[in-house]
Amino acid sequence: MKTATIILNRNLPDVTDRLYEAIARNNEGQTDIFVVESGSERERLSKYYTYWANWEESLENGLRYARGFNYGLTKLFEEGRFKDYDYFFLLCNDSIFEEKPIISTLVKEMERHPRVGILSPCSEEWGERKLLKNNDTKYFWYINHVSWFVRREYIESIMETENPTYMNFLYDGENFRGYESDIELVIKGYANDWASAITTKVTVSENEDLLYTQFKAMRTDEFQVNRGKLVVEGKKWIRRKYGFNSRWTMQLYAKFFYEHFFEYYPQLVEYKL
């Protein structure tokens, strides 16, 4: 099973290089690693970068994770390499993992759960960890996107097919800051018979300090300002696209498809929360 790891960077080369080297060191030969420069300045590119989004708008505003992952996937698709991979590990560069192999563990878990399209490592700090209790993997209807291990067949079932670009390949690039972008993909998965799961077999943590201390280097707003824009712009996106006035309605929408998934796959009910 071949895996492509895609890491997003914007002007934090040292952070990205450390993550790249940790993934390479602990998973030798198990994954190809691609670094997407999501609007980085030339002097702040990762030494391992593969693709550089360097047009004017991207340099000014960045791609954020929706357009950034779209861009990386689109480049692989355009190069005829997309189908070379069975799985895609989509990583924000603030992801931190244990010093041990993780790719083989995630692949084995995907093989154990053939109806899972999105598999997320669990953080000890997440509330979801308490819901998992002594279980190693359960299917969820909401997963925060820090590090997602994604099955190619799932992507193929929902991706843009007529004109795939960095704006629409998988994520909706119109949702610039990614407000509820993760739950939208979970919804599309369950609507097309693909579950989303969290596993404790791999642990992830998020270096949240970067958002507070490195926002100037990333050429973004201070954390609270950015969060305010995320919510205001995101609510407009949800209302325009779905007619929903709150994120809770969006989550109820996800729960609807989640519940119906187990009606079609009753043999998987043991993995339901």
Image (cartoon, rainbow, N blue to C red):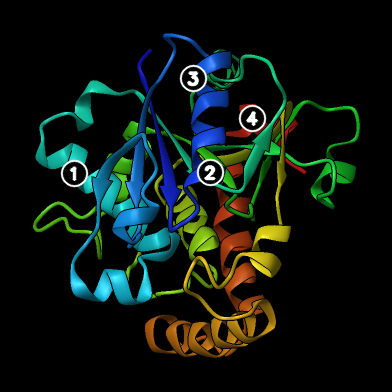
Q: Residue at x 68, y 66 (%)?
A: 213
Q: Amino acid at mark 4?
A: Leu
What number is the disc on residue 24? 3
The residue closer to the viewer here, 8 or 127, is 8
As drawn, is 181 to the left or to the right of 135?
left
Q: Mark 4 or mark 1: which is in front?
A: 1
Residue position marked by numbered label 1 in the rendering:
75
The residue closer to the viewer here, 63 or 209, is 209
Q: Amino acid at mark 3?
A: Ala
Residue position marked by numbered label 4 in the rendering:
268
> Mark 2: which secondary structure?
helix
Instruction: State which tag comes first along the sequence, 4 or 3.
Output: 3
Instruction: Please say if 51 is above or below 185.
Output: above
Within 10 Å of disc 4 (Cα), the crowding (few <14, some 14-19, many 20+) is: some
Rounded to the nearest angstrom, the CA distance separating label 1 from label 2 is: 24 Å
Residue 204 lies, in percent from the top left, at: 70, 37
Rounded to the nearest angstrom, the CA distance separating label 1 from label 3 is: 21 Å
Residue 237 lies, in percent from the top left, at: 43, 84
Within 10 Å of disc 3 (Cα), the crowding (few <14, some 14-19, many 20+) is: some
Q: Amino acid at mark 1?
A: Lys
What number is the disc on residue 14? 2
Q: Mark 1 or mark 2: which is in front?
A: 2
Q: Amino acid at mark 2?
A: Asp
Question: Which quadrant holds residue 266?
Answer: top right
Rounded to the nearest angstrom, the CA distance separating label 4 from label 1 is: 35 Å
